[in-house]
Amino acid sequence: MTSSPLRARDLPDAPPAIPGAAHRPPFVHFGPGPLTDALAGVPEGDVAGFLASWEDLPADAHLGTDTPYRFRRYGKFRLRPRGLEQLPHTAFFQDASVNRVNGGVERLFAPLCPAVAAGEPLRRVVLALGERLPGPRAGIDTCGVHQIRVVATVNAEGHPAPEGVHRDGHCYVAQVLIRRQDVRGAESCLYDPERRPVHRAVLTAPLETIVLDDRRVLHGVSPVRPAPGAGTGIRDMLLVDFFGGA
Ligand SMILES: [Fe+2]
């Protein structure tokens, strides 16, 4: 495993939700504490199964590369007060104005496995993230859940965000690190609307999280490369998009 000078204990805890506080910073970055707390009481085997599900992600067929380096599943849910209601599986769409690589194309990713979609770990994590949005929650009733693995080898780096500095086209986006193994790089950076960096971080601790207001900041992630001496590096992420459903 690689290490980083950025450690979870140096990170601030997530602030409590403050509805209507549009003046708040456009992102929060917190260590593993809040999501660890959210998962407290869930049977250990259920959490282990949730984390192990990243081992079973099909290749992203929309990458356009000969050798896949990104693997993923996707699901969409209506947010309920204490739970998630899974919506019919649909393609994931981003407007060409926000994604210059894959925008304007309906990308049909593999669905989440039923055990993940209906599992208590995902419900707990999504509800906890929904309580830590960096801005008003009004009108946010839907979320998209992406399980993503990016693999890098000595011959081919992995690109978490091949579109470069971008917006996702949602209201809020949560970026949760699940696993970082033998990885060099993958620095997350947030930018103001003038594309000036406002926050840089290397997510290193499992469940360390950034939640950003996709309307107020842009984001990007530098390429994933194997750590020195390693043949392969793996970076697993849970991304949760929050938005208002149609
Ligand atoms: Fe993104």
Image (cartoon, helix red, strand yellow):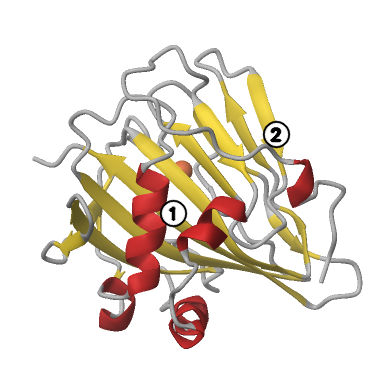
Q: Residues within 10 Å of mark 1 (few under 14, many from 20)?
A: many
Mark 1 close to ligand 1, CB under 8 Å: yes
Q: Is residue 169 above or below residue 44?
A: above
Q: CA distance from mark 1 to mark 2?
A: 18 Å
Mark 2 close to ligand 1, CB under 8 Å: no
Instruction: Where is residue 233? Give x, y as percent.
Output: 72, 71
User: In the picture provided, is 29 more to the left or to the right than 52?
Assistant: right
Say which residue appears at 80% left-offset and 78% top-offset.
231
Instruction: Where is residue 48? Give x, y as percent.
Output: 52, 82
For the N terminus, which image quadrant? bottom right
Number of the label disc, if any, that sits on residue 200: 2
Helix, strand or loop status at disc 2: strand
Residue occupied by mark 1: 239
User: In the picture provided, is 90 more to the left or to the right than 12?
Assistant: left
Q: Are marks 1 and 2 in contact (CB under 8 Å)?
A: no
Helix, strand or loop status at disc 1: strand
Q: Earlier in the sequence, mark 1 or mark 2?
A: 2
Q: Is residue 232 visible?
A: yes
